[in-house]
Image (cartoon, rainbow, N blue to C red):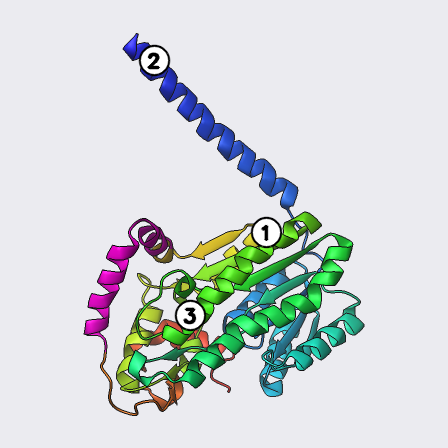
Amino acid sequence: MEAGAGRKAIFWAIAGVGAAVAGRALLRKRRAYDLIGKVTLVTGGSRGLGLVLAREFASRGARLALCARDPENLDRAQADLEARGAEVFTVPCDVTDRSQVERMVEAVRKHYGRIDVLVNNAGIIAVGPMETMTVEDYEEAMRVHFWACVYTTLAVTSEMQQRREGRIVNITSIGGKISVPHLLPYDASKFAQVGFSEGLRAELAKDGVLVTTVCPGLMRTGSHVNARFKSQHRLEYTLFSLLDTLPLTSISAESAARQIVDACKFGEPEVVLSFQAQAAATFHALFPGITADLLGLVNRALPGHGGIGTGRASGKESETALTTSPLTAPIQKAAAINNEVGT
Protein backbone atom coordinates (compact mmCIF):
# COMPACT_ATOMS: atom_id res chain seq x y z
CA MET A 1 0.00 0.00 0.00
CA GLU A 2 2.75 2.42 0.93
CA ALA A 3 4.71 1.69 -2.26
CA GLY A 4 1.55 2.16 -4.33
CA ALA A 5 0.77 5.43 -2.62
CA GLY A 6 4.32 6.63 -3.27
CA ARG A 7 4.07 5.82 -6.98
CA LYS A 8 0.76 7.66 -7.19
CA ALA A 9 2.25 10.70 -5.50
CA ILE A 10 5.15 10.71 -7.96
CA PHE A 11 2.74 10.30 -10.88
CA TRP A 12 0.57 13.21 -9.79
CA ALA A 13 3.63 15.38 -9.10
CA ILE A 14 4.97 14.73 -12.61
CA ALA A 15 1.52 15.33 -14.07
CA GLY A 16 1.27 18.61 -12.18
CA VAL A 17 4.63 19.80 -13.46
CA GLY A 18 3.67 18.81 -16.98
CA ALA A 19 0.38 20.69 -16.72
CA ALA A 20 2.17 23.78 -15.40
CA VAL A 21 4.68 23.71 -18.28
CA ALA A 22 1.91 23.23 -20.84
CA GLY A 23 -0.14 26.02 -19.25
CA ARG A 24 2.81 28.41 -19.33
CA ALA A 25 3.48 27.61 -23.00
CA LEU A 26 -0.17 28.26 -23.84
CA LEU A 27 -0.16 31.54 -21.92
CA ARG A 28 3.02 32.67 -23.72
CA LYS A 29 1.43 31.88 -27.06
CA ARG A 30 -1.71 33.86 -26.18
CA ARG A 31 0.37 36.83 -25.03
CA ALA A 32 2.66 36.83 -28.07
CA TYR A 33 2.91 40.35 -29.51
CA ASP A 34 3.92 40.79 -33.14
CA LEU A 35 6.60 43.49 -33.19
CA ILE A 36 6.53 44.02 -36.94
CA GLY A 37 5.60 47.64 -37.56
CA LYS A 38 5.23 48.42 -33.85
CA VAL A 39 6.45 51.88 -32.85
CA THR A 40 9.01 51.32 -30.11
CA LEU A 41 10.28 54.23 -28.03
CA VAL A 42 13.61 53.61 -26.28
CA THR A 43 14.87 56.16 -23.74
CA GLY A 44 18.63 56.43 -23.43
CA GLY A 45 18.66 54.82 -26.87
CA SER A 46 21.73 56.50 -28.34
CA ARG A 47 24.38 54.24 -26.81
CA GLY A 48 25.10 51.18 -24.67
CA LEU A 49 22.27 48.79 -23.93
CA GLY A 50 19.69 51.22 -25.35
CA LEU A 51 21.36 51.15 -28.75
CA VAL A 52 21.77 47.36 -28.67
CA LEU A 53 18.08 47.02 -27.77
CA ALA A 54 17.15 49.32 -30.65
CA ARG A 55 19.11 47.10 -33.04
CA GLU A 56 17.33 44.00 -31.73
CA PHE A 57 13.85 45.55 -31.95
CA ALA A 58 14.64 46.74 -35.49
CA SER A 59 15.78 43.24 -36.49
CA ARG A 60 12.27 42.06 -35.57
CA GLY A 61 10.56 44.66 -37.70
CA ALA A 62 9.83 47.41 -35.17
CA ARG A 63 9.87 51.09 -36.09
CA LEU A 64 12.12 53.00 -33.73
CA ALA A 65 11.93 56.22 -31.79
CA LEU A 66 15.00 57.07 -29.72
CA CYS A 67 15.57 59.80 -27.20
CA ALA A 68 18.71 60.87 -25.34
CA ARG A 69 20.22 64.10 -24.09
CA ASP A 70 23.07 64.43 -26.60
CA PRO A 71 22.01 65.23 -30.23
CA GLU A 72 25.39 64.12 -31.62
CA ASN A 73 25.08 60.71 -29.96
CA LEU A 74 21.57 60.42 -31.38
CA ASP A 75 22.83 61.26 -34.87
CA ARG A 76 25.48 58.54 -34.66
CA ALA A 77 22.93 56.03 -33.34
CA GLN A 78 20.51 56.92 -36.13
CA ALA A 79 23.21 56.43 -38.77
CA ASP A 80 24.15 53.07 -37.23
CA LEU A 81 20.55 51.86 -37.25
CA GLU A 82 19.64 53.17 -40.69
CA ALA A 83 22.70 51.42 -42.11
CA ARG A 84 21.10 48.21 -40.82
CA GLY A 85 17.84 49.01 -42.59
CA ALA A 86 15.93 50.33 -39.56
CA GLU A 87 13.31 53.08 -39.62
CA VAL A 88 14.39 55.59 -36.97
CA PHE A 89 13.10 58.86 -35.54
CA THR A 90 15.16 60.65 -32.90
CA VAL A 91 14.31 63.38 -30.39
CA PRO A 92 16.82 65.03 -28.04
CA CYS A 93 15.30 64.92 -24.54
CA ASP A 94 16.33 65.06 -20.91
CA VAL A 95 13.92 62.51 -19.43
CA THR A 96 14.29 63.99 -15.94
CA ASP A 97 12.37 67.06 -17.20
CA ARG A 98 8.67 66.26 -17.37
CA SER A 99 7.86 69.01 -19.87
CA GLN A 100 10.60 67.78 -22.21
CA VAL A 101 9.26 64.23 -21.91
CA GLU A 102 5.75 65.32 -22.83
CA ARG A 103 7.04 67.26 -25.86
CA MET A 104 9.18 64.31 -26.92
CA VAL A 105 6.27 61.85 -26.70
CA GLU A 106 4.06 64.22 -28.66
CA ALA A 107 6.76 64.53 -31.35
CA VAL A 108 6.93 60.74 -31.68
CA ARG A 109 3.14 60.53 -31.92
CA LYS A 110 3.09 63.25 -34.57
CA HIS A 111 5.74 61.41 -36.60
CA TYR A 112 4.40 57.84 -36.31
CA GLY A 113 0.81 58.36 -35.17
CA ARG A 114 1.12 56.13 -32.08
CA ILE A 115 3.46 54.49 -29.56
CA ASP A 116 3.10 50.74 -29.10
CA VAL A 117 6.11 49.86 -26.96
CA LEU A 118 7.93 51.95 -24.35
CA VAL A 119 11.36 50.87 -23.13
CA ASN A 120 12.52 52.83 -20.08
CA ASN A 121 16.26 52.32 -20.38
CA ALA A 122 17.88 55.66 -19.49
CA GLY A 123 20.27 55.32 -16.59
CA ILE A 124 23.37 56.56 -14.80
CA ILE A 125 25.71 54.99 -12.30
CA ALA A 126 27.98 56.46 -9.64
CA VAL A 127 30.41 54.15 -7.82
CA GLY A 128 32.07 54.81 -4.49
CA PRO A 129 31.90 54.38 -0.71
CA MET A 130 28.83 55.60 1.16
CA GLU A 131 30.89 58.40 2.78
CA THR A 132 31.47 59.96 -0.65
CA MET A 133 27.85 59.96 -1.75
CA THR A 134 26.06 63.29 -1.38
CA VAL A 135 22.36 64.10 -1.19
CA GLU A 136 22.69 65.34 -4.78
CA ASP A 137 23.85 61.88 -5.87
CA TYR A 138 20.71 60.31 -4.41
CA GLU A 139 18.47 62.99 -5.93
CA GLU A 140 20.04 62.59 -9.36
CA ALA A 141 19.70 58.80 -9.30
CA MET A 142 16.03 59.08 -8.33
CA ARG A 143 15.36 61.61 -11.09
CA VAL A 144 16.92 59.43 -13.79
CA HIS A 145 15.76 55.98 -12.70
CA PHE A 146 12.46 56.61 -10.92
CA TRP A 147 10.94 59.93 -11.93
CA ALA A 148 11.94 59.70 -15.59
CA CYS A 149 10.32 56.26 -15.71
CA VAL A 150 7.16 57.72 -14.17
CA TYR A 151 7.08 60.67 -16.59
CA THR A 152 7.43 58.58 -19.75
CA THR A 153 4.99 55.95 -18.52
CA LEU A 154 2.28 58.47 -17.68
CA ALA A 155 2.78 60.08 -21.07
CA VAL A 156 2.04 56.89 -23.04
CA THR A 157 -0.33 54.78 -20.94
CA SER A 158 -3.61 56.51 -21.86
CA GLU A 159 -3.31 55.71 -25.55
CA MET A 160 -2.30 52.12 -24.79
CA GLN A 161 -5.26 51.70 -22.44
CA GLN A 162 -7.64 53.12 -25.03
CA ARG A 163 -6.36 50.66 -27.66
CA ARG A 164 -6.30 47.91 -25.02
CA GLU A 165 -2.84 46.80 -26.05
CA GLY A 166 0.76 47.83 -25.55
CA ARG A 167 4.01 46.90 -23.90
CA ILE A 168 6.15 48.71 -21.31
CA VAL A 169 9.63 47.41 -20.53
CA ASN A 170 11.45 48.85 -17.51
CA ILE A 171 15.19 48.21 -17.45
CA THR A 172 15.96 48.13 -13.74
CA SER A 173 18.87 46.16 -12.24
CA ILE A 174 19.83 43.30 -9.97
CA GLY A 175 20.72 46.29 -7.79
CA GLY A 176 16.96 46.79 -7.45
CA LYS A 177 16.71 43.43 -5.70
CA ILE A 178 20.01 43.24 -3.81
CA SER A 179 21.58 46.43 -2.50
CA VAL A 180 25.30 46.05 -3.11
CA PRO A 181 28.07 48.18 -1.53
CA HIS A 182 29.49 51.28 -3.23
CA LEU A 183 26.29 51.79 -5.25
CA LEU A 184 23.85 53.12 -2.67
CA PRO A 185 22.15 55.90 -4.70
CA TYR A 186 21.91 53.57 -7.68
CA ASP A 187 20.54 50.70 -5.58
CA ALA A 188 17.95 52.85 -3.81
CA SER A 189 16.64 54.34 -7.06
CA LYS A 190 16.51 50.93 -8.72
CA PHE A 191 14.51 49.49 -5.81
CA ALA A 192 12.02 52.33 -6.34
CA GLN A 193 11.88 51.60 -10.06
CA VAL A 194 11.30 47.88 -9.46
CA GLY A 195 8.42 48.66 -7.08
CA PHE A 196 6.83 51.04 -9.57
CA SER A 197 7.22 48.55 -12.41
CA GLU A 198 5.74 45.60 -10.52
CA GLY A 199 2.77 47.63 -9.31
CA LEU A 200 2.27 49.09 -12.78
CA ARG A 201 1.90 45.60 -14.25
CA ALA A 202 -0.83 44.79 -11.75
CA GLU A 203 -2.65 48.03 -12.55
CA LEU A 204 -2.48 47.85 -16.35
CA ALA A 205 -3.05 44.14 -16.99
CA LYS A 206 -6.83 44.69 -17.03
CA ASP A 207 -6.37 47.02 -20.01
CA GLY A 208 -4.29 44.63 -22.10
CA VAL A 209 -1.06 46.55 -21.42
CA LEU A 210 1.69 44.26 -20.18
CA VAL A 211 4.65 45.56 -18.17
CA THR A 212 7.95 43.69 -17.96
CA THR A 213 10.49 44.35 -15.21
CA VAL A 214 14.04 43.60 -16.37
CA CYS A 215 16.74 43.10 -13.73
CA PRO A 216 20.11 42.72 -15.45
CA GLY A 217 23.34 41.80 -13.78
CA LEU A 218 26.62 43.00 -15.25
CA MET A 219 26.57 43.34 -19.04
CA ARG A 220 29.29 43.98 -21.57
CA THR A 221 27.72 47.11 -23.08
CA GLY A 222 30.79 49.37 -22.97
CA SER A 223 28.99 51.84 -20.70
CA HIS A 224 31.71 51.53 -18.05
CA VAL A 225 33.65 54.34 -19.75
CA ASN A 226 30.80 56.78 -19.02
CA ALA A 227 30.07 55.62 -15.48
CA ARG A 228 31.25 57.93 -12.71
CA PHE A 229 33.62 57.00 -9.92
CA LYS A 230 34.42 58.60 -6.59
CA SER A 231 37.10 58.40 -3.91
CA GLN A 232 39.92 56.14 -5.19
CA HIS A 233 38.39 56.38 -8.63
CA ARG A 234 41.09 54.55 -10.60
CA LEU A 235 40.95 51.55 -8.28
CA GLU A 236 37.14 51.59 -8.25
CA TYR A 237 37.11 51.77 -12.05
CA THR A 238 39.62 48.94 -12.42
CA LEU A 239 37.56 46.60 -10.24
CA PHE A 240 34.34 47.61 -12.01
CA SER A 241 35.90 47.08 -15.45
CA LEU A 242 37.28 43.65 -14.63
CA LEU A 243 33.94 42.44 -13.23
CA ASP A 244 32.16 43.94 -16.24
CA THR A 245 34.30 42.11 -18.78
CA LEU A 246 34.81 38.60 -17.38
CA PRO A 247 32.49 35.94 -18.84
CA LEU A 248 32.04 34.43 -15.37
CA THR A 249 30.61 37.69 -14.00
CA SER A 250 28.90 39.32 -16.99
CA ILE A 251 26.93 38.61 -20.17
CA SER A 252 27.11 40.15 -23.62
CA ALA A 253 24.82 43.07 -24.39
CA GLU A 254 23.54 41.24 -27.47
CA SER A 255 22.47 38.21 -25.43
CA ALA A 256 20.79 40.50 -22.91
CA ALA A 257 18.94 42.38 -25.66
CA ARG A 258 17.61 39.18 -27.23
CA GLN A 259 16.25 38.03 -23.87
CA ILE A 260 14.72 41.43 -23.12
CA VAL A 261 12.96 41.67 -26.48
CA ASP A 262 11.70 38.08 -26.09
CA ALA A 263 10.32 39.01 -22.66
CA CYS A 264 8.59 42.02 -24.20
CA LYS A 265 7.14 39.96 -27.06
CA PHE A 266 5.70 37.32 -24.72
CA GLY A 267 4.62 39.75 -21.99
CA GLU A 268 6.78 38.21 -19.26
CA PRO A 269 6.30 39.84 -15.84
CA GLU A 270 9.99 39.74 -14.96
CA VAL A 271 13.33 38.64 -16.34
CA VAL A 272 16.55 38.49 -14.32
CA LEU A 273 19.49 38.45 -16.71
CA SER A 274 22.52 36.18 -16.31
CA PHE A 275 22.61 33.00 -14.30
CA GLN A 276 24.85 34.77 -11.78
CA ALA A 277 22.19 37.41 -11.13
CA GLN A 278 19.47 34.76 -10.97
CA ALA A 279 21.45 32.75 -8.42
CA ALA A 280 22.15 35.86 -6.33
CA ALA A 281 18.50 36.96 -6.38
CA THR A 282 17.29 33.49 -5.39
CA PHE A 283 19.83 33.22 -2.56
CA HIS A 284 18.90 36.67 -1.28
CA ALA A 285 15.18 35.85 -1.36
CA LEU A 286 15.80 32.72 0.71
CA PHE A 287 18.49 34.07 3.03
CA PRO A 288 18.32 37.88 3.18
CA GLY A 289 20.20 38.10 6.47
CA ILE A 290 23.08 35.96 5.26
CA THR A 291 23.24 37.99 2.04
CA ALA A 292 23.52 41.23 3.99
CA ASP A 293 26.30 39.83 6.16
CA LEU A 294 28.20 38.50 3.14
CA LEU A 295 27.94 41.87 1.42
CA GLY A 296 29.28 43.46 4.58
CA LEU A 297 32.37 41.29 4.21
CA VAL A 298 32.64 42.24 0.53
CA ASN A 299 32.50 45.91 1.48
CA ARG A 300 35.51 45.49 3.76
CA ALA A 301 37.53 44.38 0.75
CA LEU A 302 36.52 47.33 -1.45
CA PRO A 303 38.55 50.56 -1.72
CA GLY A 304 38.10 52.87 1.24
CA HIS A 305 37.41 56.59 1.43
CA GLY A 306 40.16 58.78 -0.01
CA GLY A 307 41.45 60.08 -3.30
CA ILE A 308 39.07 62.63 -4.84
CA GLY A 309 36.49 62.14 -2.08
CA THR A 310 33.04 63.33 -3.13
CA GLY A 311 34.33 64.48 -6.53
CA ARG A 312 33.48 62.40 -9.59
CA ALA A 313 35.61 61.16 -12.47
CA SER A 314 34.31 59.34 -15.51
CA GLY A 315 35.61 55.94 -16.52
CA LYS A 316 37.47 57.57 -19.39
CA GLU A 317 39.25 59.77 -16.86
CA SER A 318 40.15 56.80 -14.67
CA GLU A 319 41.89 54.48 -17.12
CA THR A 320 44.91 52.48 -15.98
CA ALA A 321 47.30 50.08 -17.68
CA LEU A 322 45.06 47.21 -16.54
CA THR A 323 41.80 48.71 -17.84
CA THR A 324 43.33 49.23 -21.28
CA SER A 325 45.02 45.83 -21.39
CA PRO A 326 43.90 42.73 -23.34
CA LEU A 327 42.08 41.61 -20.18
CA THR A 328 39.32 44.13 -20.88
CA ALA A 329 39.25 43.69 -24.66
CA PRO A 330 35.57 42.59 -24.72
CA ILE A 331 34.28 45.78 -23.11
CA GLN A 332 36.71 47.97 -25.04
CA LYS A 333 35.22 46.51 -28.22
CA ALA A 334 31.67 46.95 -26.88
CA ALA A 335 32.36 50.60 -26.06
CA ALA A 336 33.55 51.20 -29.61
CA ILE A 337 30.63 49.52 -31.40
CA ASN A 338 27.92 50.75 -29.00
CA ASN A 339 28.65 54.46 -29.37
CA GLU A 340 30.15 54.89 -25.89
CA VAL A 341 33.56 56.28 -26.79
CA GLY A 342 32.35 59.06 -29.05
CA THR A 343 30.92 61.09 -26.14
Q: Quadrant of residue 335?
A: bottom left
Apparent side of residue 276 relative to residue 161 in the rendered image (left or right): left
- Specify the segment rendered in magenta: 278-302
Callout 2 amino acid: Ala
Q: Dot 3, how many residues are within 10 Å of its Cα: few (below 14), some (14-19), or many (20+)?
A: many
Q: Dot 2, how many residues are within 10 Å of its Cα: few (below 14), some (14-19), or many (20+)?
A: few
Pair 2/1: label in front: 1
The image's mark for residue 188 is: 3
Q: Earlier in the sequence, mark 1 or mark 3?
A: 3
Callout 3 amino acid: Ala
In which quadrant will I find the N terminus?
top left
Q: Earlier in the sequence, mark 2 or mark 1?
A: 2
Apparent side of residue 216 relative to residue 44 in the rendered image (left or right): left
Residue found 32% across the figure and 85% down from its top: 132
Residue found 64% across the figure and 46% down from its top: 32
294, above or below 145, in the image: above
The image's mark for residue 202 is: 1
State the residue in front, 319 or 43: 43
Residue found 45% across the figure and 30% down from its top: 17
Q: Secondary structure at mark 1?
A: helix
**Whether residue 187 can be seen here:** yes
153, above or below 80, in the image: above
Residue at the spot of label 2: 5
